[in-house]
Image: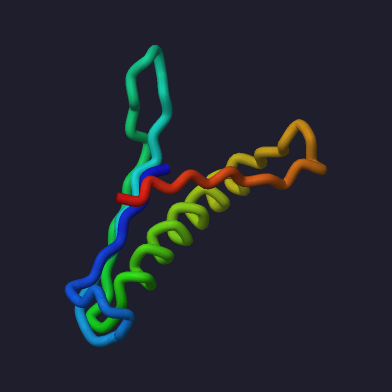
Amino acid sequence: IYTDGSSMNKINRNDSPGGWAFTISILNNNKMKRLYENKGGENKTSNNIMELLAVIKSLEYLKDQLNENNYQPLNSNNNEITVCSDSR
């Protein structure tokens, strides 16, 4: 999952437009295949809100897909999510 969010105002004030986006990809035969992407925005928001909303929306999408396909993990006691962040 690749996520990003931004707003015009980098200060933590909720008074500028911003947007969020995410892409879900898988590695198939050493090539990245894009499965799904989505985006959105708000008129009055902050950079932090948009960054977090991108992650939330991507996880909501995955949850909906897993529920829709009746996915059951092999080890139901392992409720772990690994999150990697590429801070630039």
Return the residue nearer the eye: 41 or 88: 88
The number of numbered discs placed on residues in the rendered structure image is 0
From this view, report whether residue 20 is shown above or below residue 34. below
Q: Position of residue 51 (x, y in %)?
A: 36, 63
Identify the residue at the far right of this view: 77
From this view, report whether residue 26 is shown above or below residue 37. above
12 on left or right of 83:
left
Q: Residue at x 44, y 57 (%)?
A: 55
Return the residue nearer the eye: 15 or 60: 15
From this view, report whether residue 51 is shown above or below residue 84. below
Q: Quadrant of residue 1?
A: top left
Q: Position of residue 46 (x, y in %)?
A: 31, 77
Return the residue nearer the eye: 6 or 67: 6
Q: Residue at x 34, y 25 (%)?
A: 32
60 on left or right of 81:
left
Q: Quadrant of residue 80?
A: top right
Q: Residue at x 42, y 65 (%)?
A: 52
Identify the residue at the far left of this view: 8
Identify the residue at the far top of this view: 29
Return the residue nearer the eye: 59 or 12: 12
